[in-house]
Amino acid sequence: MTRGDGIFDANVAATYDSLHGGSDTADVARMVDVLEWLAAGGAALEFAIGTGRVALPLAARGVRVAGIEISAAMAAVLAGKPGGAAIDVALGDMTQTRVPGAFALVYLVYNTLDNLTTQEAQVACFENAARHLAPGGRFVVETLVPPLQKIPFGENAVVSEQSDGHRCVDTFDVVTQAYASHHTWDGKPPLTVPFRYAWPAELDLMARIAGMKREARWADWARGPFTATSTRHVSVWRKTSGLGGGGKAV
């Protein structure tokens, strides 16, 4: 399953940046540093480019950036920002939509891989990334480590966010690897968003199916070491065919 304007509609798109932080945050700056380094002077393609919170600052560094986005509303917000009209965005599903050209870097950030709610769709995403990569190109994914250690044995829910007027409870099915975020707000209708989690080792296997091999895994965009207590990871896989003598990420 994928989702477009059904969840990321005009109302969500209009408030997305204010709710999820702007492109001048320290974490986004570190992210852009790493993506620019990994692109190594080549072109970059962002899956689920959204409102351009990452693509625009990366393009401002001189990296040629294109994107795929399933939500027309999110893409419209990007197009309306300064510099947004210069970024080519293909409307469609990141598991199958094609963009012309070969890229040095394809990236997918902010847990967005989990928006694909079947293993089959997640594998297809890796395969589509590989199709867009030049030989030796890199696919980067930032996503969460399933927080199952926080849930008592036999239970299936954890409060992931609680602030003035907003509460989010995540529920997990450890048999199917499905989970959902249940949001409630004061004075607004509740919203449930379905996801599928995948363990880092499972993603390595998806990459291998797609013809890529893991090159690096970090706990964050500061490239801290990934450990048993890391809550998220930034993973880099490299297209193995025609790898050549390019540099290795560390």
Image (spheres, rainbow, N blue to C red):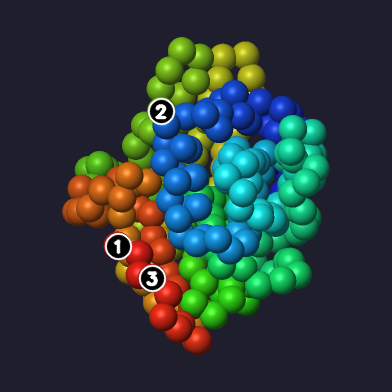
Work out whether mark 2 precedes mark 3 in sequence or the reverse, and give the earlier one. Answer: 2
Kind of residue at badge 1: Val
Disc 2: which residue: 161
Disc 1: which residue: 250
Q: Label 1: few (<14), some or many (≥20) within 10 Å? A: few
Circle 1 SS class = loop
- Judge whether 212 appears above or below 65 on screen: below
Q: Residue at x 51, y 35 (%)?
A: 182
Q: Residue at x 68, y 32 (%)?
A: 12
Percent of width and height locating residue 108: 54, 55
Q: How many marks?
A: 3
Percent of width and height locating residue 13: 70, 33
- Judge whether 217 appears above or below 162 on screen: below
CA–CA distance between discs 2 and 1? 33 Å
Percent of width and height locating residue 103: 62, 68
Circle 2 SS class = strand
Q: Residue at x 42, y 36 (%)?
A: 27
> Residue 247: which disc?
3
